[in-house]
Image: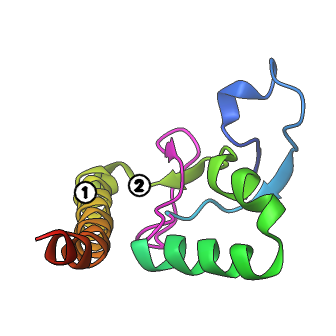
Amino acid sequence: MSTLTNPPLAADHAPGFTTANVELRCALTGRPVAPDEAYWAPPLITAHDLIATTLRTLAKTPGNLGAVLMAEQPNVPYAPEARATLASRRTAEQLKLIALLLLVAALLITPIVLLAA
């Protein structure tokens, strides 16, 4: 266990970072990662999580939707060898979301086109 800040190099220059004794674990694989080899990036957000959070926020507190969707995510540690896997997972989640949005758009536009014809 070591004392570290998230991310370690930003501790001296940025307020708001807290220091704690923690063991770093890769957010994707769960394996322990040394602080000096950790790759820091925003967490992986799945299309399901994004849609569920958006719908839940719309139902409970619609005024917070902008803050929930646009807030900066804190960086989490990843193992260096997980970068390629993380990139492919992010791409897959983006494709799922785009496909869902296109499907919703098609379902909304189809009746309009049929009624106009």
Nearer-the-camera pick, 85 or 48: 48
In the picture of the structure, the residue carrying the numbered disc 2 is 79
Query: Alpha-carbon neighbours of circle 2 within 10 Å: few (<14), some, or many (≥20)?
Result: many
Relative image position of residue 88 (x, y in whole percent): 22, 59
Looking at the image, which residue is at 28% across and 64% down? 89
- Indicate the secondary structure of the residue bearing disc 1: helix
Image quarter where the C terminus lies is: bottom left
Query: Disc 1 or 2, which lies upstream in sequence?
Result: 2
Relative image position of residue 56 (x, y in whole percent): 69, 81
Nearer-the-camera pick, 108 or 67: 108
Looking at the image, which residue is at 46% across and 70% down? 31
Residue 91's mark? Answer: 1
Q: What residue type is disc 2 on?
A: Ala
Q: Which residues are magenta?
A: 27-46
Residue 68's mark? Answer: none
Q: Quadrant of residue 54?
A: bottom right
Left or right of 49, for residue 46? left
Q: Is residue 52 above or below residue 66?
A: below
Looking at the image, which residue is at 78% across and 68% down? 62
